[in-house]
Image: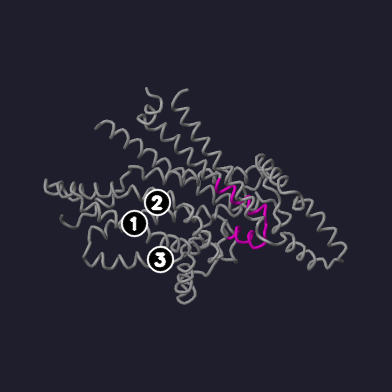
Amino acid sequence: MNPFIKFLVRRAGFLVLTFITFILIIFILPRSIPGNPLATLLSQLFQQAQTNPDLIKAVHRKLMEEFGIGKPIHIQFFEFITRAFIGDLGTSIAFYPRKVAEIVFTYLPWTLGLLIPATITSWVIGNLLGALAAYKRKTVVDNVLLPIFLTLSQTPYYWLAMLLLFGLAVTLRIFPIGGAYSPIRLPALTFEFIVDLLHHYTLPFLSIVMGAMGGWAIGMRVMAIYELRADYISYADSLGLPDSKLLRYVFRNSILPQITGLALNLGTILGGSLITELVFSYPGTGYLIFRALSTLDYPLIQGTFLLLTSTLLLANFIVDIMYAYIDPRIRTGYTGG
Amino acid sequence: MGVGCLKGWMVIRAYGVERTVLVILVWGLILEVATLLYFYTSAQTWRFEFQYTLVLFAITVAALAAFVVRIVRRIRSSIDTG
């Protein structure tokens, strides 16, 4: 078999294995939480309709049947897998009778608009400031930056979000306290609405950027200091190479662990952003997952996690193929050509 | 070493940096395409979420294109220089 095809098959195999493990986890974990997922829905129906207990029992039976909650666990799992593969994520319990796909796709754009720019910004700024602190070590710059990095890196996302909320929204009233836009505005691509959107966007964005930045900066600072002490730097310096060249070498060698760190920390970043959404009542998937978890909405929990994680696995796989396609050396390495 | 050279920090060199950023961008792109397809097939293109995703999609595509061009250039120059 062609080595490149072999590589792709191996990667695809790992992808499928990871995916199956993940599906098992997201199926079992919510079901291990004690409680009846239909209780909230039934109590809502009861409050709205003031129906008699016999009718409630009948509705309960019908809902148990519809959601398949009373069925044996392996049958539930099989049904979930079968439906998921044809794109049916089921009906939400908390938002009954809305479909899970409809709910997730309504909330998803808000998370994407917040998470991706904030993650990339925090990573870039963190690494640049970390390198700056290393380069200016034992100067005022480093003495000021280091405590800030340490404080930020040890501050939980939700605490930082609440501090920003209290300082800039509640006390100084510069920014709104929550939501993605003012309730008096109708969402539209108009100038006024976009300004309002950005006004609401600033605090959650800052919260994620600042929360993640400290860790990156410290990591980069440590690596850059280590590299600055290396023999090859002293040698290059003695040869009279310009500072920009030396720093490029330092940055290049220090950045590698940071890249691995970003890949490993994607889950933490995602989790942090979900909590931030919750603090700011931002209508993203974090807010949605919280609603789903607090009401034990199995279909919604499964649907949201399934979509977010399966696409992340797929993105990793696509990037592997892209690199092999772009870089002839990788391609040649696999094909032996 | 002297001081005052910010140029070295301001240039974020590739060497795999792009890969992780690329994963995030591709991930965003897949989710954006899925969202757009969902709204389009369910005839909900009037929704603000659809328009917002369309804007995000354009930004992601532009960023992705810039990254791919950058990677191709880097690879070509590194091959040329051996």
Q: Which mark is residue A154?
A: 3
Mark 1: amino acid: Gly
Disc 2 chain ID: A
Q: Which mark is residue A261?
A: 2
Marks 1,2: beta carbons within 8 A? yes
Screen quadrant of the C terminus of chain A: top left
Q: Distance from label 3 to label 2 (Cα)?
A: 17 Å
Marks 1,3: beta carbons within 8 A? no
Compared with residue B10, is residue A1 higher up or lower down, i.e. above or below? Answer: above
Q: Distance from label 1 to label 3 (Cα)?
A: 13 Å
Residue A84: x %, y % from top left: 66, 43
User: Where is residue B77, by image quadrant?
Assistant: top left
Residue A35: x %, y % from top left: 70, 62
* Residue hosting label 1: A219
Residue, x 47% and y 27% (percent of image)? Answer: A5
Label 1 and label 3 in one chain: yes
Residue A138: x %, y % from top left: 21, 65
Image: magenta residue range: A287-309
Give the residue furthest to the bottom: A171
Q: Distance from label 1 to label 2 (Cα)?
A: 9 Å
